[in-house]
Image (cartoon, rainbow, N blue to C red):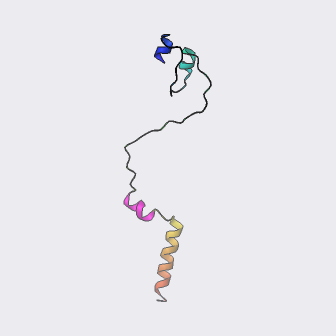
């Protein structure tokens, strides 16, 4: 982009973000497609212990399982 602005290049091809300032500084063609930005973090992908155990079921399922176990104790 700097070389185009300094008139050292006639044409440029790059994967840069189109901003209002860049559109005012240099003439840009209409983009073919738009990409979204990706953000990388150092966050761990491992689940906490309680989520690893309780995670597969929602709370109504856990209530039903507990009730079934408590009610099944008496006939057994």
Q: Position of residue 34 (x, y in %)?
A: 58, 33
Closer to the camera in the image, 55 or 12:
12
Q: Using residue 18 as the reference point, say whether residue 54 is left or right of it.
A: left
Closer to the camera in the image, 18 or 71:
18
Q: Is residue 52 above or below residue 28?
A: below
Closer to the camera in the image, 69 or 20:
20
In this view, the residue farthest toward the front is: 10
Q: Position of residue 64 (x, y in %)?
A: 52, 73
Q: Residue at x 61, y 22 (%)?
A: 29
Q: Residue at x 51, y 65 (%)?
A: 59
Q: Is residue 52 magenta?
A: yes
Q: Is residue 40 magenta?
A: no
Q: Residue at x 53, y 19 (%)?
A: 22
Q: Residue at x 53, y 14 (%)?
A: 10
In this view, the residue farthest toward the top is: 7
Q: Which residues are magenta?
A: 48-54
Q: Is residue 33 above or below residue 48?
A: above
Q: Position of residue 20 (x, y in %)?
A: 56, 21
């Amino acid at each position: 982009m700097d070389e185009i602005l300094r008139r050292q290049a006639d044409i440029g091809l790059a994967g840069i973000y189109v901003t209002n300032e860049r559109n005012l500084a240099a003439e840009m063609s209409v983009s073919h497609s738009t990409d979204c930005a990706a953000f990388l973090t150092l966050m761990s992908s491992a689940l906490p212990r309680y989520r690893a155990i309780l995670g597969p079921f929602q709370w109504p399922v856990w209530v039903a399982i507990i009730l079934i176990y408590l009610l099944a104790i008496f006939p057994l």
